[in-house]
Amino acid sequence: MTEEIPLASGHLGRCLHGKKAEDQKRMWRGITSGLVRLHPDRWLYPSDYLRFANSIYNFKFRTDDVLVMTWPKCGTSWVQEIIWTMKNNPNLDNPEQSTAISMRVPFLDKFSIPVVICSFNPNSSLLPARTRVLQSISQECVRGKTPVTATPKPRAIKTHLPFSLFGPSLIDTSKVIYMARHPKDIVISYYHHVCLFKSMSYSGTFDQFFEAFINDDLVYGPYWLHLKEAWEKRDHDNLHFMLYEDLKANPLRELRNLDTFLSTGLSADQLEKICNYTHFDQMKQRNNLWEDIGIEDNVYNKDFAKEHGGFFRKGESNSWQSRLTPEQNQKMDDWIAKNLTPLGIEFRGQGV
């Protein structure tokens, strides 16, 4: 019988075992710790999550914190750079702006750091100094510490976890910015991501990845439930719900809305400059999201990156039109009709 581990969130963690575990291990070669399923919602995470689940649930947020909550590949790096710049660098003169985004806006999901570093040998002289820094951070996380607590105020923090895995006081204490994205684009971008990063080293086909997505069998899934939990809180004063497609279509308008939500009181000139500074093409040129670990062989699959692009790939909406087969497109339409349409969420370009 599989052991069930009770969590502070009310979920039961059950590590995958037997054939299911072996199949997932072959598919996700970089996640060496195995996977855990949280019931009853069926969240699927690296099993390292179990070591940090209760401390994440009980994390003490501050009233001046801003939490950026997204599912993977919903524009996390884009919106977190916008938020940090609006709150900490409105005149684009903060000396910390050249520091990697992943250091300025830390990942609250502490389990993700050991997962990223898990395949590295900490004693290897081949590791770049910046990677050894992250190795040290991962060891601190294992001891119960987190880089989030070292981040100066006002903090911008990010997570891929859903509301139900945090304490109920989160949204009453801090501001939360949630950004959603069209699921047809997510499945393509997320596939690229897990093939690119050796911390996941996904080895399956895109067809298998697509089927896992629509069957709620993908790491960090199910997406529809993640989205549903945020959508149901969309009228809360401390939640700002955004769509990736809207930010792409009219970024200045979205920055004005964020300025109102965050009470940053920025001028029209400041917002215009921040809009230009955080444009996808500008961020791709700077490519400073992962400067702290470097584009090294032990981080990226460089052959995959050379053929398909690196971390900042396209930043497009509706790219699915050139990738999904007619059958996959219909399956996704059916998935949307079942899981998202009842919520009343409409994505730009959906069904075209």
Image (cartoon, rainbow, N blue to C red):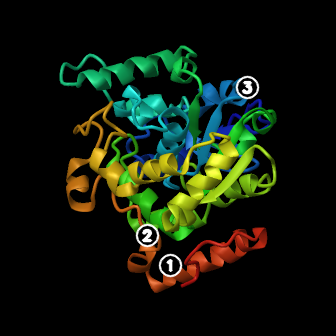
Q: CA distance from mark 1 to mark 3?
A: 40 Å
- The residue under label 1 is 328
Pointer 3: residues within 10 angstroms few (<14), some, or many (20+)? some
Q: Nearer the viewer, residue 88 or 2?
A: 88
Q: Quadrant of the C terminus?
A: bottom right
Q: Locate residue 57 relative to residue 221 in the image: left or right.
A: right
Circles 1 and 3: CB atoms closer than 8 Å = no
Circles 1 and 2: CB atoms closer than 8 Å = yes
Q: CA distance from mark 2 to mark 3?
A: 38 Å
Q: Secondary structure at mark 3?
A: loop
Q: Locate residue 227 relative to residue 282 in the image: left or right.
A: right
Where does the image place residue 92, in percent across and percent down from the top left? 41, 37
The disc placed on residue 259 is none
- The residue under label 3 is 58
Which residue lies at the image location 54% right of the left edge and 42% below the top edge? Answer: 83
- The residue under label 2 is 207
Q: Nearer the viewer, residue 94 or 2?
A: 94
Which residue lies at the image location 45% right of the left edge and 17% below the top edge? Answer: 139
Pointer 2: residues within 10 angstroms few (<14), some, or many (20+)? few
Residue 39 can be seen in this image:
yes
Ranked by sequence position, the earlier of labels 2 and 3 is 3
Which of labels 1 and 3 is toward the front? 3
Ranked by sequence position, the earlier of labels 1 and 3 is 3
Pointer 1: residues within 10 angstroms few (<14), some, or many (20+)? some
Q: Which amino acid type is shown beneath numbered disc 3? A: Asn
- The quarter of the picture where residue 15 lies is top right
Where does the image place residue 158, in percent across and percent down from the top left? 56, 38
Q: Which amino acid type is shown beneath numbered disc 2? A: Asp
> Up-down: is 193 above or below 101?
below
Which residue lies at the image location 67% right of the left edge and 61% below the top edge? Answer: 224
Q: Secondary structure at mark 2?
A: helix
